[in-house]
Amino acid sequence: MHRNYGVKAWTVTGLVLFLIGCDLNFLQNPVAPGIDEDPPRYSVQYSGNGHTSGSPPATEYYLQGATVTVKGNSGNLVRESYLFSGWNTASDGTGTYRAPGSTFLMGTQDVRLYAVWEPEGPVFQSRFVALTDTGNVWVSYDGSVWGGPYSTGLSVGNDLSVGGGTFVAVGQLAGGSYGIAWSEDGIVWQSINLGGSSASLYRIAASSTGNFVTIGQIPGVSQTFISSDGKNWTGPITTVYTAVGPGWVSGSVYGNAFYITRGNGIGWYKSSDGSSWGSPLGGTGSNMYQVNTLIGLDDRIVVGGGAPSSTNKQTRTSTDGGLTFASTVNVHTATGYIYGFAANPATGRILSVGSGTPQVNYTDNYGSSWTQATGISGTTTFQRVYFGGGRFLAGNDDGEIYSSLDGATFSASGTITGKVSGLGFKGSP
């Protein structure tokens, strides 16, 4: 506990006279007339509880009744063969559990929170990873309980992909350069500076064989970078301006390739590995007021965005590799824009997420018609949706993550700190 004393405004002469006239009672208890005692402040301390590297968050002080927000693993605490999963008021885990980002009211005693460590075990555990706009990630082993945050080294996190057993996050580094971070376990990350000024990577996609393509922008220029493992990168490769994508399209006729397009859907480009994009494809009937994202499945391409003034979320579908597109489909006649897609390859179900209620919708006919998913509450925008580990996960700008086994009925999975900007899954070897 800390106490602070505030001295009222006196003249120097008055202070001297007061000190001359003071007695031993003042020396023993230096709270005298003219001196205000501030309310006591109590500390919240963090302990690494056996950590082998990193540092616990700094101690902070609060008044009684103040709301305390529990910190995350901001100092990258690590304990060999264990995973950080939150805090507890007892070092042996028998006290009160405090999840990062949760809150409690400050009492009249100092509080010490001990890191909770879960054995990782000799075999890699399957896990989900959620990236936030601040560049931090959270990890879950069941899609319901999330631990973190863990730092990727990015100052801005925009998207996440998984390929060849490697998680790759993209965004921007402090200072404004292109930033990439990779991890094999979702907890310990290595960041890479790919240069550029006022540069940011916005989207990333992985092929079925673990090749990656990411796309970003410096002022006036869109550029891509490519990698065969997520750790070593080649680029930049200049592409069409305001490029959207990349999206990996599966299929034996038009698929097994990355596709990108322009922000209005006019002009489509295809590449087997992202190293070159060739001449534009036809793209007849592909135009849309605003295109934000695309997905490929079974030789089909579905593009998502919206109409002017966000009057309708919209999609268009191509069945011939981007040469022609079917008419625009309004998604549930809902206002807003589509920002993300995900698909279950086994069932062919595709989910779209975006702004404006209903934010989550699904299709079983490659975008010819859409149905509203249930179980989503509120009106917050969703930027990302992902399928992996046998389930769909959707994350919104309030850090809320929803889970569904079928993509039609969702339930709340957990809440993390920050806007969800990427989701991924890595299974056991």
Image (cartoon, rainbow, N blue to C red):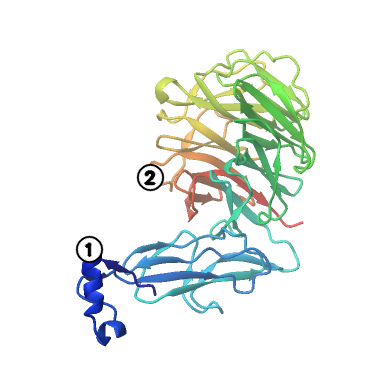
Where residue 332 sits: x, y (%)? Answer: 43, 31
Which amino acid type corresponds to the residue marked 1 in the rendered image? Thr
Asked whether 183 or 35 is in front, the reply is 35
Give the residue displayed 56% in from the left and 21% down from the top.
Answer: 263
Q: Secondary structure at mark 2?
A: loop
Give the Cα distance between marks 2 and 1.
Answer: 59 Å
Which amino acid type corresponds to the residue marked 2 in the rendered image? Gly
**Quadrant of residue 55 in the image?**
bottom right
User: Which label sits on residue 267?
Assistant: none
Q: Which corner quadrant holds the N terminus?
A: bottom left
Q: Which residue is mark 2?
A: 378
**Quadrant of residue 291 in the image?**
top right
Asked whether 43 or 96 is in front, the reply is 43
Q: Which corner quadrant holds the C terminus?
A: bottom right
Where residue 359 sits: x, y (%)? Answer: 45, 38
User: Which label sits on residue 11?
Assistant: 1
Q: Is residue 374 above or below residue 284?
A: below
Q: Is residue 225 visible?
A: yes
Total labels: the figure holds: 2
Give the residue displayed 48% in from the left and 66% down from the top.
Answer: 59
Q: Is residue 77 above or below residue 242?
A: below
Where residue 398 sits: x, y (%)? Answer: 44, 47
Mark 2 vs 1, N-terminal side: 1
Q: Residues within 10 Å of mark 2 (few under 14, many from 20)?
A: few
